[in-house]
Amino acid sequence: MKKPKLYPLDLFRLRQDEAAAFVSRFETDYIALNLDSSSEPDFNLILQKMLDQLPTYILAVNQMQAQAESKAIAALDKARDIKIGTFRKALAVFENSDVAPEKAAHSLLKLVSNNYRNVAKENFETESLNLTKFIADLRNPTHLPALQLLVLGNHVNNMETANESFKTTFSTRSNTVNTTVVYDAKKLNKDILDAYKKLSNYILTMVSIKDVPFYNALFDMNNNIRQYYATIIARRGDDGSDIPAGV
């Protein structure tokens, strides 16, 4: 009989959301097998020790994702504020223009800008709404000729792009993460993957010494999952975007 081997998988190259999905996949695939484990108390104990950690680990992963989202939102808000400032600086260039039409255009657009002077200081949602209105006002038929004369259309486009990027990210943010508890995701990651390794090695040992359907099915299931996630890791590029979840 050929000696069974685990499909090669570097567990600690799994990202934390992937590690959570990996353990969840083990649970769902095991349930789908509908095996009778009543005569395997050691297996049940090791499995349960791993699964008991899963709910807390998922909360930790969700919290990390929410924190990353918050950082991304703050960065996008700063980016659109910079675009607003850039537009106003570009407009200010024409304040002392010696060309009468430019000076008149500046005065007209300055009035519009002043109506939204505090837009960058407003809360996220209010700024999104008022910046959209600001852009629409600048582009309306009354103000568009002045905008075109001073060649400021590109700055308005940049404000719009930055605002839409912010709104897209903000609208898809997580809203269900418990922020009253701070999880040590790094330790939880190590603990649950260590628990999986213990379970996986136990299955390997048992299938090596017992030729029984229960462990044969478990071994095949486990290797299928390992192969799936090994393929995910292998498909990643080496551009630095692969941030390991391990210690």
Image: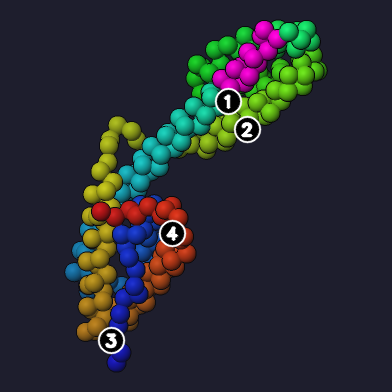
Neighbourhood count class around disc 4 (C-alpha, 10 Å): few under 14, some 14–19, many 20 upward: few
Q: Which residue is mark 3?
A: 3
* Amino acid bearing label 2: Thr
Cα gap from disc 4 to disc 2, whole angstroms: 30 Å
Cα gap from disc 2 to disc 1, whole angstroms: 9 Å
Depth check, mark 4 against mark 2: the one in front is: 4
Tell me: 30 left or right of 93.
left
Q: Is residue 139 visible?
A: no
Is mark 3 in CB contact (under 8 Å) with mark 1?
A: no
Q: Which residue is mark 2?
A: 161
Cα gap from disc 1 to disc 4, whole angstroms: 33 Å
Cα gap from disc 3 to disc 1, whole angstroms: 64 Å
Q: Position of residue 96 (x, y in %)?
A: 67, 7
Neighbourhood count class around disc 2 (C-alpha, 10 Å): few under 14, some 14–19, many 20 upward: some
Q: Position of residue 8 (x, y in %)?
A: 34, 73
Q: How many callouts does the rendering have?
A: 4
Tell me: 148 left or right of 247.
right
Is mark 2 in CB contact (under 8 Å) with mark 1?
A: yes
Q: Residues in magenta?
A: 85-97
Image quadrant where residue 66 sits = top left
Neighbourhood count class around disc 1 (C-alpha, 10 Å): few under 14, some 14–19, many 20 upward: many
In the rendered image, residue 96 lying in the magenta stretch gets the answer: yes
